[in-house]
Amino acid sequence: MRGMKVGALVVSASLALAACGSSGGGGGKSSGAGGGSSPAGGASKPPAKTIKVGMAYDVGGRGDKSFNDLAAAGLDKAKTTLSVQTKELAATQGESEQAKESRLTLLAQQGYNPVVAVGFAYATAVGKIIKQFPSTKFALIDDDSVKGPNLESLLFTENESSFLVGVAAALATKTKNVGFIGGVNEPLIQKFQAGYQAGVHAIDKSIKIQVKYLTQPPDFGGFGDPAKGKTTALGMYNAGADVVYHAAGGSGAGLFDAAKAVNKLAIGVDSDQYQSAPADEKSLILTSALKGVDTAVFDFISDYTKGQFQAGSKRFSLKDNGVGYATSNPKIEPFKAKIEEFKAKIISGAITVPTTI
């Protein structure tokens, strides 16, 4: 879930936006291994070609404990199991489209192939860059508006996982009042809202659902503003909500702070945010709507290494465990049977979860 747009950066500055990189030579932001072996006869084999994978993160990069970190986890797995070399760059708040284009250009020019663009905010930039580098394979997460013979879109049924956590919220609320915080009022995030509302009302149509978006396009800062997330969440809790779900990227940290301040429940997104939360917040994160960005990224890279790249769209759903809900917090146990009942109905097709509000 995510994407960011912002004010202009000069090209030279955007090329310096290395988010996080592992140890390695040259540039200090890449890592990996490659080389050849000598057969028993002593003749040298030519070294195997090292596959270099580029990753362009959304705002926040590694460390957001959500969307970007999942992409990073998929990259890390590829680095460990497939011995690929990597370079990671990240967007910054307020950057221009030119900055995104420059970031992707830098990776392609330096021989990184494939390149993964993390988030729908890269769609316009990807649409230009894939034409300039037709021999480089790209993946774009959360958007399929761009088409090309060297592009694969990685998509998810976020509405389905949001439905399940909506069921959890409805079963857990004691006030019959719950909340939804969206980072940016954009179609992808509206899909989270649509699924959540459907899940809540599948249990009880009388439950009130408060909805707030932190920013409106073209301001994408709502994905990286924990302070605004906290203020918005506190407003919901003070207005009677006792469970609040966020689809707001890094701003979700503010929701968890607010939940701790008033001792109410929160629901995370993308990753199992119970696992990454501070000890004093864990018990308040009832569940999280899971999104298998890590699996999608690893599978994309793995397919490329096998010569199995396929242009087009690949969607990860509840049926193939591409999305789901977290069960780490023991507080979810009383509700699991009912959630699983709805999960089975979605998978069978008995329930079709809406994608729009």
Image (cartoon, grey):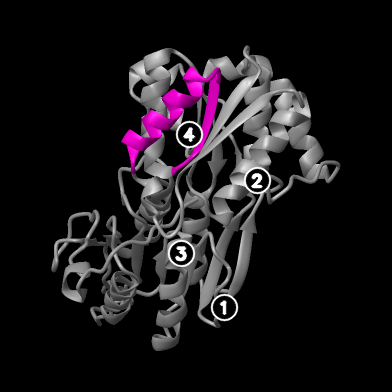
Q: CA distance from mark 3 to mark 1?
A: 19 Å
For label 4, the SS is loop
> What stretch of residues is rendered in magenta?
225-248
Q: Nearer the viewer, mark 4 or mark 1?
A: 1
> Which of labels 3 and 4 is toward the front?
4
Tell me whether circle 2 and circle 1 mark residues in contact (CB < 8 Å): no
Percent of width and height locating residue 251: 38, 39
Between the residue at mark 3 and the residue at mark 2, the CA separation in whole angstroms equals: 26 Å
Q: Which residue is mark 2?
A: 159
Q: Amino acid at mark 1?
A: Lys
In the image, what residue type sits under mark 2?
Answer: Asn
Q: Residue 235, which numbered label? A: none
Tell me: residue 326, above or below residue 297: above
Marks 2 and 1, how far apart in space? Answer: 23 Å
Whole-percent x and y of residue 120? 48, 62
Q: Is residue 113 above or below residue 317?
A: below
Residue drawn at (17%, 66%) of the image? 16
Judged from the image, the secondary structure of the residue bearing numbered disc 2 is helix
Mark positioned earlier in the residue sequence (3 or 4)? 4
Q: What is the three-letter code of the residue carrying label 3?
A: Ile
Q: Which mark sits nearer the N-terminus, 3 or 1? A: 1
What residue is pinned by disc 3?
A: 301
